[in-house]
Image: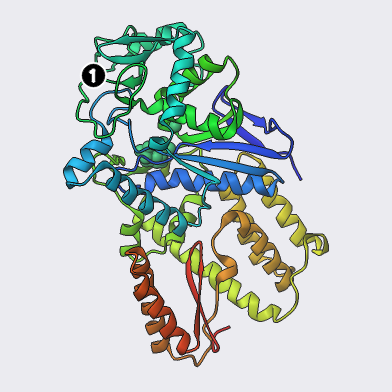
Amino acid sequence: MTALKLFNSMGRSLQEFKPLREGQVGFYGCGPTVYNYAHIGNLRTYVFEDLLVRTLRRFGYQVTHVMNVTDVGHLTGDDDTGEDKMVRSAEERGQSVLQIANFYTEAFFNDTDRLGIERPTVVCRATEHIQEMIDLVKRLEKKGFTYLAGGNLYFDVGKFPAYGKLANQKLEDLKAGARIEVDENKRTPQDFVLWFTKSKFENQALTWDSPWGRGYPGWHVECSAMSMKYLGESFDIHAGGIDHIPVHHTNEIAQSEAATGATWVRYWLHAEFLVMDKGKMSKSKGDFITLDSLVDAGFHPLDYRYFCLGGHYRTQLSFSMEGMAQARSSRKALREKILDLRAAAKDKPLPARENLGSAAKDRLGNFDAALAEDLSAPRALAELWQLLKDPSIPPEEMLAVAFDMDTVLRLGLAEVRRIEPGFDPEKVARIEALVSARAEAKKLKDWAKADSIRNQLKDEGVLLEDGPTGTIWKSATTA
Ligand code: AMP
Ligand code: ZN
């Protein structure tokens, strides 16, 4: 297979991917701050990370994917300004921080499951890794990178000459252009908090003992400590949204490399933003679109996945309902095509890659080449369409190649089923309604109701299969 090339934000260039350990990839992606639902902008970034993981697998790597869940320490300003997001959300909703964290963590994975995003190998909560963070901060303190001021422990960026390398900015330029809220305790405006004790954030609900007093960790230190715990002090890939370059990832690098003295991450990948007509979508402002609101508007979650794959991850993607409607009709056309092919291929076995004819082989080769060129999903999707439109390719080859491509695209092509002519449409509608009612019951953890619906359908000869993209049903009268 062609060599995989990725655009490394560190150095701003397209580079051939070479892992630290042969055949293995350690990958860390910054996870959600669980004080609210994820908006579809956040979800775009996670669709991109899923594309990355699936592509790495396709290229033969075994991937260890680690994702954190931020349930403490993330303030409304990434630069330690504002209020604690979790505390504010808990106060607004009259619940504990833990309740808020549990609720939105579950909601997050419910969204990612429906988008066909594979769960990470390791999901780690910040509140369960406080000791690792304290240990890392202690190392920094020992090496002289920290100072205590106003009750908080700060990282002294002036002691780390490479500060700002990822953002391609020198500290002098950053200082000159700083518009950061003045924190009189800081020696340099870019210094950031490693550990909060006495400060303006005294209403923090969760605090822990530490060598610097009872308090809680800064946001950036979470990712450094947790990634090193699960992936080692140097690992292959770190990803996130592009907004994280100037502050969060810049600070993560400074504290990680100051502590270990080694290169922490080799490849940095950043997804561009999903933008709205009105500009940036913001989780903290509250006026944002969620996956559920798209579902309420009549879209399938995978329509949004398709929409995301239509743009390269490094270009801004403009969201619109028209674009979503287009994605929906493309996905519908895809499903219909798959059904036609199924009928045409009858029971012929699907050939393996080496037994494909040259036209199908070429399509698959182009598909891999598109992914190899910095994960070009739009080109990969175009190859799928070209394949399905080529009359010279026999149906069973088309199906084999489409399913193979779908291991990365994850549009649920293999699960598409036709309802046979003559199968009562009213019965179909009733089954679909029961399947949705069961999904709703599962969401509310009403297992008794969910099971009773499953049993009721079973009695009628309808079997349910739960998959990562939802439930599919089969009946004796459907293909
Ligand atoms: P958060 O939960 O706020 O920490 O954000 C989760 C992820 O979503 C981060 O990687 C952000 O960089 C990313 N993100 C935030 N807003 C957008 C957006 N409008 N488009 C794409 N990604 C975003
Ligand atoms: Zn992070």
Viewport quadrant of the C terminus: bottom right
User: 43 left or right of 48?
Assistant: left
What residue is drawn where x is 46% and y is 90%?
A: 460
Relative vertical location of residue 369 with respect to residue 295 in this rendering, above or below: above
Q: Nearer the viewer, residue 136 or 242?
A: 136
Residue placed under numbered mark 1 in the picture: 198
User: 168 left or right of 321?
Assistant: right
Name the residue type under label 1: Lys
User: 211 left or right of 343?
Assistant: left
Relative vertical location of residue 423 with respect to residue 55 in this rendering, above or below: below
What residue is drawn where x is 41% and y is 88%?
A: 427
| Quadrant position of residue 346 | bottom right
Q: Position of residue 445 (x, y in %)?
A: 34, 65
Label 1 CA crowd tier, 10 Å (few <14, some 14–19, many 20+): some
Relative vertical location of residue 424 with respect to residue 406 in this rendering, above or below: below
Q: Nearer the viewer, residue 130 or 288?
A: 130
State how many labels appear: 1
Residue 168 appears in the figure:
no
Q: Position of residue 261 (x, y in %)?
A: 58, 14
What residue is drawn where x is 40% and y is 61%?
A: 325
Outermost right residue: 355
The image quadrant where one finds ligand 1 is: top left
Q: Nearer the viewer, residue 378 or 184?
A: 184
